[in-house]
Image (cartoon, rainbow, N blue to C red):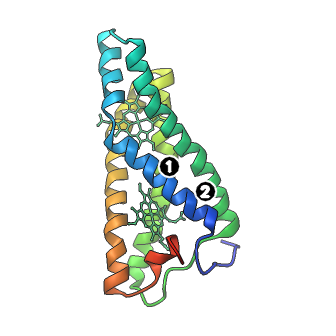
């Protein structure tokens, strides 16, 4: 990328990282309302209450999509800190791929959900609740497990670049 690598993420990048993490966890963990909507549409028994509950999931997910656009613009214009040179090259590559994958999912997850919710595209719903969700969980858990490895094994400053760094 043309942008020179900064020493740390900018304050807006950090703010967006943490707000998005909260919104994504919310939708991953509290999905009962949208699952109830899915069952009710299949059974033809949707009520205004069910729609109101499902809309929370939809709006949180659309907020993720909007923030993802902003985050991508910031990433392209401000760049991101380089991986510490002392970390093994294979893990530097793994983290590049994982971050790229997360960016892709910031778009695929909300768009597939919207296609099911607003346009009744069943295959999009199956992907959203199936493989896309599973890959998102795997990347998020791997991402979090990597933090103590950077901090305690390689003793680099990666963990603080998204907080106080
Ligand atoms: C990053 C954002 C999102 C995350 C993390 C997320 C997560 C989830 C999860 C965990 C489920 C339950 C899957 C299961 O049955 O185990 C689900 C289902 C669903 N979500 Fe999302 N969602 C997101 C965005 C959206 C958006 C923006 C919409 C629509 C506007 C949406 C619509 C749906 C629908 C319709 C289902 C039911 C799908 C089905 O079972 O066929 N989601 N979502
Ligand atoms: C749903 C939850 C999360 C997602 C989707 C996520 C996603 C990401 C992505 C895509 C990056 C790359 C930076 C960028 O270019 O934007 C990143 C960086 C980072 N994240 Fe997360 N994150 C999540 C939760 C967390 C949590 C819970 C922690 C801490 C325990 C954390 C700590 C970090 C740190 C320290 C970095 C900086 C890594 C570096 O400098 O290369 N993240 N995150």
Percent position of residue 71, x then y:
60, 56
Identify the residue at horizontal 31%, vertical 85% (top origin).
Answer: 153
Q: In the structure shown, which secondary structural element does the residue marked by tag 2 occupy?
A: helix
Where is residue 34? Give x, y as percent: 36, 28
Q: Quadrant of residue 138?
A: bottom left
Q: Are marks 2 and 1 in contact (CB under 8 Å)?
A: yes
Q: Residues within 10 Å of mark 2 (few under 14, many from 20)?
A: many
Separation of marks 2 and 1 at Cα, in angstroms: 10 Å
Instruction: Identify the residue at image location x=48%, y=88%.
Output: 85
Residue 118 in the image: above or below residue 151: above
Instruction: Answer with the quadrant where ligand 2 appears in the image.
Output: bottom left
Q: Which mark is residue 71?
A: 2
Closest to the observer, 120 or 55:
55
Tell whether circle 1 marks a residue whose Cβ is less than 8 angstroms from ligand 1. Answer: yes
Q: Establish if 43 lies above or below 76.
A: above
Q: Quadrant of the C terminus?
A: bottom right
Quick one: which residue is furthest to the bottom in this view?
86
Q: Nearer the viewer, residue 135 or 45?
A: 45
Residue shown at the point (45%, 31%) measured from the top left:
56
Q: Residue at x 30, y 31 (%)?
A: 32
Q: Is mark 2 within 8 Å of ligand 2?
A: yes
The picture quadrant where one finds residue 98 is bottom left
Q: Is residue 66 left or right of residue 122?
A: right
Residue 37 position in % (x across, y down) = 35, 22
Sequence-earlier tag: 2 or 1: 2
* Label drawn at residue 82: none
Identify the residue position indicated by label 1 in the image: 106
């Amino acid at each position: 990328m043309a942008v020179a690598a900064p020493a740390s993420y900018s304050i807006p990048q950090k703010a967006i990282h943490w707000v998005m993490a909260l919104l994504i966890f919310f939708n991953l963990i509290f999905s009962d309302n949208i699952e109830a909507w899915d069952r009710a549409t299949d059974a033809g028994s949707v009520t205004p209450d069910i729609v109101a509950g499902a809309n929370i999931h939809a709006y949180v997910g659309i907020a993720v999509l909007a923030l993802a656009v902003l985050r991508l613009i910031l990433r392209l214009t401000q760049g991101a800190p380089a991986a510490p040179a002392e970390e093994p090259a294979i893990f530097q590559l793994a983290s590049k791929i994982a971050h790229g994958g997360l960016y892709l999912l910031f778009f695929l997850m909300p768009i597939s959900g919207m296609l099911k919710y607003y346009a009744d595209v069943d295959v999009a719903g199956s992907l959203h609740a199936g493989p896309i969700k599973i890959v998102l969980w795997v990347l998020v858990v791997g991402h979090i497990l990597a933090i103590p490895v950077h901090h305690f094994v390689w003793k680099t400053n990666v963990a603080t670049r998204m907080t106080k760094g």
